[in-house]
Amino acid sequence: MNIVTPELAERLAAEYVLGTLTGGARRRFDALLPAHPALRRAVAAWEQRLLPMALRSEPVQPAPRVWTGIEAQLGWRAAARPAPWRLRFWQALATFATVAAVVLGTVPRHGPVAAPMIVVLHATKGSETIVAGLSPDRRQLSIQPLQKVALTSDQSLELWALKKDGPPASLGVIAADKLTAIHPKSLPGDTKGLAVSLEPLGGSPTGAPTGPVLFVGELTL
């Protein structure tokens, strides 16, 4: 794959983000990304272009018959395989929009309201993702898993603010399969990231994480 020309690199990055770059070309592009900072910058730029569009869009849940029809045409069984990458991409954007809408809906409107900061928390093991939205004043936070996190009846997920100095600060228990709106007085000013740990039902009994950290995301305030 020739990526010498900026024009080609830009076009491939756009197709990669949109999901139209498929098959062997996509696999080769994935292999090239770690060694080519210019490609990574182009991909990040296209993600930044598309995310605001998603934030301005109202999420729409397709009818069950739509998914059934797609699976039938592709010869897939309903629960046997995950959705295609392109469908997961748009489902993720819909989640971004939902999280951002909840944050913006709880911010007092005294003139133009800045867009919330979107933080993506990646699983420490596996490929699951949690999306969080933080208001510009750091007082409103919404968070939602893209995939349901499997828990037993005696377990909870707890959200933590990771500080540059000092122990993590609890932001409360969050749902494993839906959006949670959190209203902290204010996020600590030296917060460098968010983390989600596995805790006993109701949250940590000690005020500090007691179980394994399942998700982590960087945050720059």
Image (cartoon, grey):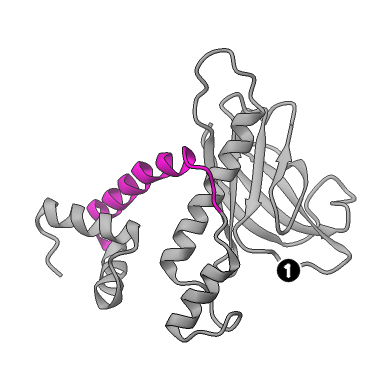
Task: Name the residue tied to disc 1.
Answer: 150
Residue 193, percent from left and from top: 59, 43
Comparing 18 with 35, the one in front is: 18
Prevailing secondary structure of the magenta residues: helix
Query: Is the N terminus in the top left, top right, bottom left or bottom right quadrant?
Result: bottom left
Comparing 166 with 151, the one in front is: 151
At 76% from the left and 42% from the top, the residue drawn is 170
Asked whether residue 167 appears in the rendered view, the answer is no
At 34% from the left and 63% from the top, the residue drawn is 19
In which quadrant of the rendered view does residue 61 lie?
bottom right
Q: Residues within 10 Å of mark 1 (few under 14, many from 20)?
A: few
**Residue at the limit of the structure toward the left, as seen here:** 5
Q: Where does the magenta region start and end?
A: 35-60
In which quadrant of the rendered view does residue 74 lie?
bottom left
Q: Is residue 76 above or below residue 213?
A: below
Residue 130, percent from left and from top: 60, 54
Q: Let me know if residue 59 is in the magenta part.
A: yes
Type of amino acid at the residue the image marks with label 1: Ala
At 30% from the left and 72% from the top, the residue drawn is 22
Comparing 163 with 97, the one in front is: 97
